[in-house]
Amino acid sequence: MAMIRSNLFNLSFYVWSVFMVVLFAPALLLPYQVTVWGQRQWARGVNFLMRLGAGINVEYRGLEHRPTGGAIVAAKHQSAWDTLIWHAILDDPAMVMKRELLGIPIYGWMCRKTRMIAVDRKAGTTALRAMLQDGREAVALGRPIVIFPQGTRVAPGASVKDVPYHPGVSALYRGLDVPVVPVALNSGLFWPRRKFMRRPGTIILEFLEPIAPGLPRKEFDALLKDRIEGATSALELEAGIEK
């Protein structure tokens, strides 16, 4: 039964995603807020399909820490779900993403339209400077910036030594002089990376206490890791699911 439900959800997810991309393709010719609204409906629809098809609910915690303007959201990344949910819970987020994703027809054009922050990982310091410039523009417009400090999906329980935090989040912290809101989650227990199987249960996403600007780099890096990793481990333990 679990396999059947997983397959039904996966099918509905892809059908819904393609439908929304095609439906909102004409929005590329309209003000960008129309595309932003479409992204929000897409994310909400995915949550609905998860609950209906795979028995996966979603719980948000720490909403008092959720930014309402220019700030940096530094989130754990365990699942494809983590890349889309921000459209539903933040107001016009600027996602830090791989530049090659801009080459995907229609989807990539929508990312350009909504002014996501595309990073060329092979460009080194040049990429960091470009990311900072795009970040300044986003903050000036009151948009929250979402970044995954480890840069990729990480399986629950994986060591930070195996998948270290990248310097991008520290560069944004030092260059933009805005708070960083750490985020912990346990989505990888229910929507695992590189697997089609989905597990019923409750994904928890928790906004943690913001880190004020102005800390030395090493102190910031250590504090960010401690908050994200500690809270993520607690959420994984709370779920009680074998990893």
Image (cartoon, rainbow, N blue to C red):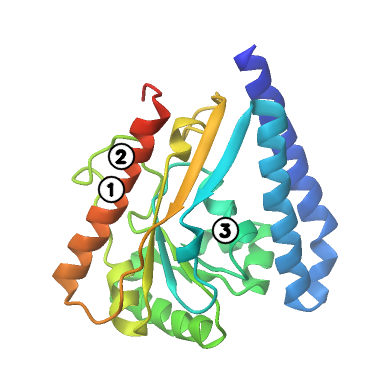
Q: Which residue is mark 3?
A: 86
| Residue 44 location (% of width, % of height) | 70, 50
SS category of the residue bearing label 1:
helix
In the rendered image, which quarter contains the N terminus?
top right
Q: Alpha-carbon distance for marks 3 and 2?
A: 21 Å
The disc, 3 or 2, on the residue closer to the chain's N-terminal end is 3
Instruction: Judge whether residue 106 can be spotted in this image.
Output: no
Type of residue at label 3? Trp
Residue nearest the viewer, comparing 18 with 61: 61
Name, please, the residue furthest toward the top.
Answer: 1
Q: Answer few, some or many: residues within 10 Å of disc 2's Cα (few below 14, many 20 plus, some between 14 and 19).
A: some
Please indicate whether residue 57 sits to the left or right of residue 172 in the image.
right
Marks 1 and 3 close (CB-CB < 8 Å) = no
- Tell me which corner region of the image, top left, top right, bottom left or bottom right, holds residue 31: bottom right
Q: Which residue is mark 2?
A: 233
The disc, 1 or 3, on the residue closer to the chain's N-terminal end is 3
In the rendered image, which quarter contains the C terminus?
top left
Q: Which residue is mark 1?
A: 229
Marks 1 and 2 close (CB-CB < 8 Å) = yes
At x 48% / y 64%, what residue is drawn? Answer: 64
Q: Is residue 203 depicted above or below 176 in this figure?
A: above
Residue nearest the viewer, comparing 142 with 197: 142
| Residue 102 location (% of width, % of height) | 58, 63
| Residue 150 location (% of width, % of height) | 33, 54
Q: Alpha-carbon distance for marks 1 and 3?
A: 20 Å
